[in-house]
Amino acid sequence: MLLPDTDSAVPLARRLARGSAALHHPSGRPWLVHNYPAEQVAVSADRSDRRLAVVGFSAVTPAGLSQAVRHLDGPDRLARELDGSFWVVPSFAGRSHALGSALGVRRIYRARIDGVWVALDRADVLAEIGSFDFDETTRALRTIMPLVHPLSEEPLWRGIEPVSPGESLTIEADGNRYWHRRWWTPPKAEMDRSRGAERLRDRLAAAVATRTNGGGVVHSDLSGGFDSTPVTYFASLGRARVVASTAYNTDLGGREDLVWARKALPGIEHSILSLEALPTFCLGFSEVTARFDEPSDTIRAAPRIAAMIQAARSNGARVYLNGLGGDHLLSLMPAWDHTLLRRRPLTALRRVRISQLLEGATFRTAFLPLLRSQPYRAWFGRMVETMEFRDPYRKATAMDLTWGQRIYWPRWLTTAHRAAVTTRLREIAGTADPLAPTLGEHAYLAVIRGGARVARAGAQLGAARRVAFESPFLDDRVVGACLATRIRDRGHPKQFKPLIREAMRGLLPGDFLRRNRQTSGDPQASRGIRAAESELVDICRHSVLAERGTIDLDELRSHAFGGRLQAGGARANSHNGPACRRASTLASTPVSSPLPSALSTVARFARQRARSGGLPRRDRAMTAETSIGS
């Protein structure tokens, strides 16, 4: 926790002291109370009225800290120039500052507790310390999918406010005033593919090195794809003993990852495991006790990830490296062509024509959206006013060119809460701004932020087992390398992740870099959802959402599972009509299935908070004392 340089904060610091380490302002008052390992905390030497800490994995050196502490803009420059993923926390002339990461992996939240403003990296801990109540409307809002910008920034607790990614927080010495300031802006996209790939290679290598420089054992996922394989390769060059792990399954093509992983890195220490030996998607939530501070899609695979983290820890690993963020950074985005049309129209039209042929889209579907352009607030407001229930049979096109995905009402959200959410959405529409001026760059940043939320939840799973669950692709400087590459060079409709292929040319085998497909986990997800139906409904039935009338359980059973589940959670005998249709929808579109995608995520989060003490006492009393657990 970041504390202001005032005597009024001393009692709060004493409350937090048990089991925590403390750093102090130059005045001697408590400044930073934390429980991070020593290897993740670097602090400048005492210097009159200034101190500076970097918390997390970084390439900071004592000389770099000394240089940064001499200048008022030193912390900003340090945050922009350091490789890794971290917070920069200065104490300058009595003022307390905090800079998180630019895209949202390292968050900051502020609240007023015991009469002073403080900051923390987890909203749930702030809520527990300050006994803040949930915001019922925000909780209902988070049952909506997808979570378009800026819905994820709506505070889940009254009295707790997030600091937007890329902004810093400053708290005055007396603890009575604060302000936010933007310290990060996306770089200009000016590099061609060759230069962009070179920078991506250098920055990813440096990002991984910040995790391996401490030595010891480092676990690294190795799927044989273009995300985890480069991470594992760079990890193998460092000081740590790297143990790579590849999972396989008995589905058609389920052993392909194993073949490609061995082909890519034949000499690495390699462990192999069957996915059949791990928890199934959406099953086993009750076995996961890790705390999350917001609903997350990571929940769906939390038991599996937790089991893999535990296995890594049993092997002595202090860090668990993964390829999360690679898909978000490196995959083609059709929205780029909307922006490219206004800069290089012929190039954009050729790309869209290729996409049209590959997708089997009509001329009207492919080309007319390129011409549409409207302000973000107008688009958001129109979307709110035309919201409807999701049609599970509506086919989404990969060529949609809008500011973001359309949001839908979940059928099980009760009328009263739907009205409250509508009012909130209209308020948001009046002030919503895009993440970038152009549609293509906004869509890219929104997708990256979504990946950061998933990685952050994974990190919270790891923290519960004292293993750092790290996603180097989402480090600021790695993301910056991709953002600085020209749109037309980041991706192409006929090429799969060309930027990372070019970056790894000469480092990974050429035949590996020609891999052009990877098996999907959809069959496993479909089976998991089908097997978990009763458990998911039971989770929702015992959640705060049901206790407070946020959701209609009868509508949930009827719509999500086509009436196959009776009131007690048992299966009905009917297998025809709506039940059969809904079953086929679940089997074919597991990721967009409304229950696992949104409601169970929020319900599990609310129920977990009640059990683990994350709710004030009067909220805990209203929930069953049970729990579930990417």
Image: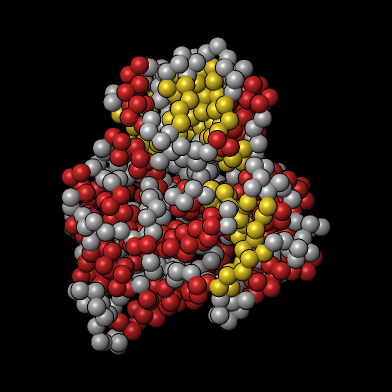
Tell me where residue 209 sits by quadrant.
Answer: top right
- 80 displayed left or right of 17: right
Q: Quadrant of the N terminus?
A: top left
Residue 233 position in % (x across, y down): 71, 56
Q: Position of residue 607 (x, y in %)?
A: 28, 55
Residue 349, quarter of the rendered image: bottom right
Count the marks: how many?
A: 0
Q: Nearer the viewer, residue 253 or 273?
A: 273
On the image, the x and y values in percent for residue 319 come to 58, 50
Along the line of sight, which residue is nearer the eye, 219 or 426? 219
Q: Is residue 514 visible?
A: no
Residue closer to the observer: 15 or 334: 15
Inspect this view and state whether residue 92 appears.
yes
Tell me: residue 426, above or below residue 223.
above
Which of 527 and 28 lies nearest the eye of the viewer? Answer: 28
Q: Is residue 192 above or below residue 351?
A: above
Instruction: Reply above or below: 95 against 213.
Output: above
Q: Position of residue 117 (x, y in %)?
A: 35, 26
Q: Residue at x 75, y 56 (%)?
A: 504
Q: Is residue 267 left or right of residue 5?
A: right
Q: Is residue 258 above or below residue 388?
A: below
Left-right relation of 17 to 254: left
Residue ID at (62%, 17%): 70
Residue at coordinates 54% horizontally, 20% vertically from top-left?
51
Task: Point out the residue furthest to the right here.
Answer: 506
> Which residue lies at the image location 71% right of the left edge and 46% below the top edge?
239
Residue 359 relative to residue 278: left or right: right
